[in-house]
Image (cartoon, grey):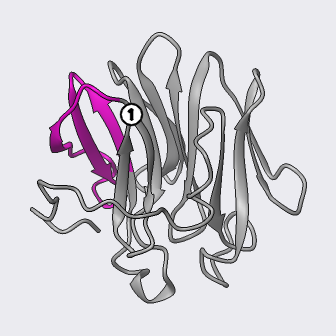
């Protein structure tokens, strides 16, 4: 959970934690996750998972195994992955021509849904703190640019509430924990 009014006006820039420190790739991202989708028994910092768009579908797989999830999608410009406290998938992708989509488990309908966000120009998802002792307080954060501003939404609000970070004319490229265990945004 991001505490209110904690964004620093003068950024303190640090290196991203591995594997988030890898160079940015629009259609592929490595993230930390648990032993299997839907299995949080060992926590969310067990192994590296990859999300990748192949021109037809968004695929999620552990680094050491076969594809574990496939989602058909068209016109994907960027893709990003996070896992919620239950090792449920949260996938964000930017669409060519504008707008983004968020795939997540909706607790009201008790099923996965795709929620569109019109007008966004870039987007990312990540867990603000995946360490085991923060499980009850951690959130999946959806960050995005819209109308020359950087915003975020959180899972605990069912992504309904929009929070302003500040103005920007840049695009959000990375959003992940840094080596100081702080959530860091990279705009380019």
Who's the residue at 18% across and 69% down the image? Answer: 3
Q: Which residues are magenta?
A: 142-170
Q: Position of residue 60 (x, y in %)?
A: 73, 48
Who's the residue at 67% across and 84% down the image? Answer: 42
User: Above or below — where is 86 with respect to 162?
Assistant: below
Closer to the camera, 14 or 169? 14
On the image, which quarter does residue 19 sit in? bottom right
165 in the magenta segment: yes
Q: How many marks?
A: 1
Q: Is residue 74 left or right of residue 84?
A: right
User: Above or below — where is 185 with respect to 93?
Assistant: below
65 in the magenta segment: no
User: Above or below — where is 26 with respect to 39?
Assistant: above
The residue lying furthest to the top in this view is: 97
Closer to the camera, 112 or 164? 164
User: Above or below — where is 150 with respect to 147?
Assistant: below
The residue lying furthest to the bottom in this view is: 133
Q: Is residue 127 left or right of residue 90?
A: left
Q: Is residue 185 left or right of residue 97?
A: left
Who's the residue at 45% across and 73% down the image? Answer: 179
Q: Give the quadrant of the C terminus.
A: top left
In the rendered image, which residue does mark 1 sit on?
Answer: 188
Q: Position of residue 108 (x, y in %)?
A: 39, 52
Q: Is residue 81 left or right of residue 171?
A: right
Q: Position of residue 18 (x, y in %)?
A: 60, 66
Query: Considering the numbered disc 1 on the image, is that residue within a helix, a strand or a loop?
Result: loop
Who's the residue at 85% across and 49% down the image? Answer: 67
Q: Give the quadrant of the N terminus.
A: bottom left
Q: Position of residue 184 (x, y in %)?
A: 36, 58
How many C-alpha atoms fall within 10 Å of the one at disc 1: few (<14), some, or many (≥20)? few
């Amino acid at each position: 959970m991001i505490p209110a009014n904690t964004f620093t006006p003068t950024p303190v820039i640090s290196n991203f934690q591995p594997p988030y420190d890898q160079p940015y790739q629009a259609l592929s991202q490595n993230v930390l996750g648990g032993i299997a989708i839907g299995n949080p028994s060992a926590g969310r910092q067990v192994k590296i998972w990859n999300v990748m768009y192949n021109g037809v579908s968004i695929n999620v797989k552990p680094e050491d195994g076969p594809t574990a999830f496939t989602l058909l999608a068209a016109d994907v410009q960027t893709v990003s992955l996070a896992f919620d406290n239950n090792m449920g998938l949260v996938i964000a992708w930017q669409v060519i021509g504008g707008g983004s989509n968020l795939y997540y488990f909706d607790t009201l309908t008790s099923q996965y849904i795709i929620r569109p966000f019109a007008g966004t120009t870039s987007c990312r998802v990540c867990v603000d703190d995946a360490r085991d002792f923060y499980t009850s307080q951690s959130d999946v954060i959806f960050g995005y640019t819209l109308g020359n501003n950087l915003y975020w939404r959180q899972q605990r609000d069912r992504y309904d509430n929009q929070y302003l970070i500040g103005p920007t004319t840049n695009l959000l490229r990375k959003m992940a924990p840094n080596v100081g265990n702080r959530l860091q945004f990279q705009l380019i």
